[in-house]
Image: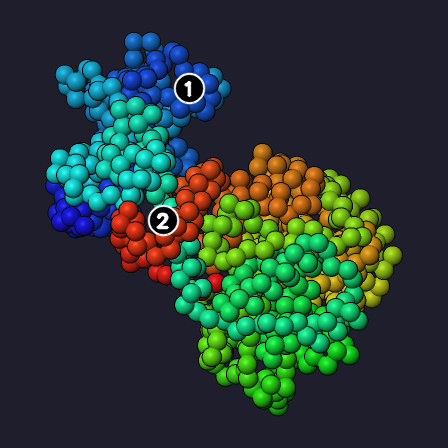
Amino acid sequence: MSSLLSRPIEFLKGVGPTRAKFLIQDFNIRTVEDLLYTFPFRYVDKTNYTTIKDIGRDGEKVLLKAKITSVKEVKGKRQQRLSAVAKDDTGYIELLWFKGVSWVRKMIVPDKEYIIYGRLSIYKGKKTLAHPELEMIKSGASKMKTSLEAVYSSTEALTKLGVDNKHRRRLIVNIFDELKPSDLEETLPPYLIEKIKLQSRYDALIKIHQPKTKEEADASIARLKFEEIFFFQLAMLFSKQRRKLKYKGPVFSQIGDAFNSFYKNNLPFELTGAQKRVVKEIRTDVGSGYQMNRLLQGDVGSGKTMVALLTMLIAIDNGFQATMLAPTQILAQQHYQSLQEYLEGTGVKVGFLSGAIKGKERKLVLEYLKNGDLDIIVGTHALLEDYVVFKKLGIAIIDEQHRFGVMQRAKLWSKNPDFLPHILVMTATPIPRTLAMTVYGDLDVSVIDELPPGRKPVKTVHMFESKRYEVVDFMRTEIEKGRQIYIVYPLIEESETLDLQNLQTGYEQIRDIFRPPEFQISVVHGRLKPAEKDLEMQRFVEKKTQIMVATTVIEVGVNVPNASVMIIENTERFGLSQLHQLRGRVGRGADQSFCILMSGNKLSSEGKERIHTMVSTTDGFKIAEADLRLRGPGDLIGTQQSGVMRFQLLNLVEDRTVTSTARSVAKLVLDSDPNLEHPANEILRNSLKVYFKKNKDWGRIS
C-alpha cells in the first residue's frame, strides 16, 4: 500500500486531530484509504434545479437555488424549532428544523443564496421542507459546475466541526491531487476487467466520488460492487477447496446391517424423491475421504430428521459414532425420543446429554460414550464440553445451525484425534439461493424441496381484533375436538417489559374465558428459568394443558402433533420467516391445522404484504424470497452469521445478477487454476492474501 493510503487520517490536509477523532469514532475512518473507501450514499444533480412554484407533490425530493430571507426560533409546547423562509424568483417556502436548532441557526446567514435539498411536506396546503441540506453559494459563483455532487453520511458532531459534504468532497480532491494511479494497485487481472467490461480500480474510485454524469457514477459503482462480492466468493471457494484437500474425513465406504435393516423393517414411510436425492449426495461426500461440510435446508415437516438418522446409520455401519446437537433441551429431548422410537428393535444404542443430566446418570452416559457402548448421542451445547469424550466420532449433525456460533461448532473438530468428523448442519429456515450461496458459500448445500405425501397444508387466515369473539368460538370448538392451541405474542428485546405485560394481559383474558379446572393453560416466555420453561412445555406435550400462551421461544422445535391451531397476536410485529417458523409448529398430525394471524386495524403497507404472503402460500422458499425483499439479509440469517454480510455497496436483494456473476467467475477461475499459480492470476493471488489478512478465515469451519 502506498504511504499516502496508509497515512493516518489526522495527517490528511483539512483533517487534524479533532476531526480525526470523530471520523474514527463515528465511521471507523482511520486512514486515507478508509476515507477513500467510504462512499457517497447518493448524488445531487446540480444541473437540475426546481423553482418553488413548480414543486407540489407531497414527499418529492426537491433541489432549489434560493435566498434565505429570514430565520427565527419558535418555541413550541414540547420543543423549540427553527423556521427559515427561502425565496426565489417564483415564490417562498418555509424551512424547518426540530433538532440541532442552535448550530443550524449559527450556520445560516440571512440574505445569502443557498443550494437547498430536502423532501417536500404539504400539510393543510402549506409547503415546507423539514431538515433540508444547505450549501451556501459563494459570492460571484452564480454558475455552478455541471456535475453530480456526492452526498456522504455525517453526524451532528462532524457537521459542527465543518466536516460537511462540501468539506468531504474537498478532502477527496486533496487525496486525488496527491494520489497517482501507480499508488493504487489493481486488484483484478486485465483479462477479467476486459471480459466483464469493468472500469479500472483507479477510475472507479475517482468517479464514484466525482462523477460528471449518472452513467459514470453507475459504472464506477458496478465495478466496486463486483469487487466486493467477487473477493468474498473467491475467498470462500478457495477456503472450501483448501479445506477439502487439507482436512481428511473418515471414509464411510459401506452400507451395512444398521442402515439396511432399518430401511427394510423400521422406515415408517416411503422417502420422498428429494430425501432420496439428499441421502445420495451425503453418501458421496462421506465416502470421498474428505471431511463433509454440508448444509441441509428443508421446510418444517420435510423430513430432515429422517435424512439425519439415515446418515448416522451409515456412520454406525462403518464403525463410527454419531452425535446430534440441538439448541434447546426440549428440542434435543424430542429428537432423542424420535430416534428411540424409530430405532426400536434395531440394536442401535442412543443416549442423551444436556446440562440437566446430573450425577450418576451423567457419569454413566459419559462412560458409555467413551468406551463405545453408545452409537448415537443426542444433546444440547453440553456435548461440546471438553469432558465429553467419544471413542470414535464419525459425524456431527447440528439442528437449527444458526443457533450455534462458529467457535462452538469448531469444538466438534477436537472430538476425534484421528479424523475430522463429518459435519451436517440443518435448518428449517428456507434461504433464497442467492443468499445461501453468499452466506454459506463455503458449504455444500442440499435442499429438501418436497413435503411427504398426505400432509395437509395449514390453513392460514387473517383476522382483525374486531373479530376476536369468532376466534374464541373457534378455539372452543377445536378444544372440544380434543385439539390443543398455541397463542404466541411477540417478544422484542428493546421492549421486553411491555411485551411481557402484553403476554400477561393476554393470558389473563384467556384464563377468564377458558377457566380451570375444565381448561388448563401453559405459559412460556424467556424470563422463565430453563427448568420452569421445560416443565410448562412438557405439560403441553403430555396434553395436560389445552392452550399454550407463549412468546417466540416456541418458534423452534416443539413437536406436538395434537396441536392444530396457531394464533399469532400482533402479527405485524413479526418478520415473514419467523411467522413461517411459528406456523410450522402446527400441521404435524393427521388433522387439518389452522394458523390465525391477529392484527389491529391499522397496518403499514409492509405489514399488509407480509400478511398477504402468509395467507397466500405455505411455500417456505417463496416466503423467504419475500422476506429477503422486505427486510434484507441480516434478519433472515440470524445474528450468528451477520458478520459476513457487511457489504458497503452490494445489496443482496437487488444485486442478485452481480452476485451470481461473481460466483460463476470465481468458480471458473479456481476450476482452471486452483492455487492461482498462473502468471495472469498473480494479481488475484496477491489481492486474496490482503483479503484474508483483513478478514478472519471463518471459511475453515462450517
Q: Position of residue 310 (x, y in %)?
A: 67, 68
Q: Counting other residues with Cα less than 10 Å from the Cα at mark 2, is it few (<14), some (14-19), or many (20 or more)?
A: many
Q: How many marks?
A: 2
Instruction: Work out whether 228 lies above or below 164.
Output: below
Residue at the far right in the pictured view: 481
Element type where label 2 sits in the image? helix
* Left or right of 380 in this view: 244: left
* Left or right of 56 in this view: 340: right
Which residue does the image show at 32% across and 17% down from the upper left?
A: 48
Q: Amino acid at mark 1?
A: Lys
Q: Is residue 647 visible?
A: no
Which residue does the image show at 68% across and 58% down from the upper left?
A: 276
Instruction: Work out whether 245 lies above or below 230.
Output: below
The disc placed on residue 140 is none
Instruction: Work out whether 61 lies above or below 435.
Output: above
Q: Which residue is mark 1?
A: 127
Q: Amino acid at mark 2?
A: Phe
Q: Nearer the viewer, residue 314 or 343?
A: 314
Which residue does the image show at 52% across and 57% down from the upper left?
A: 444
Instruction: Work out whether 644 lies above or below 133.
Output: below
Element type where label 1 sits in the image? strand
Q: Nearer the viewer, residue 609 or 122?
A: 609
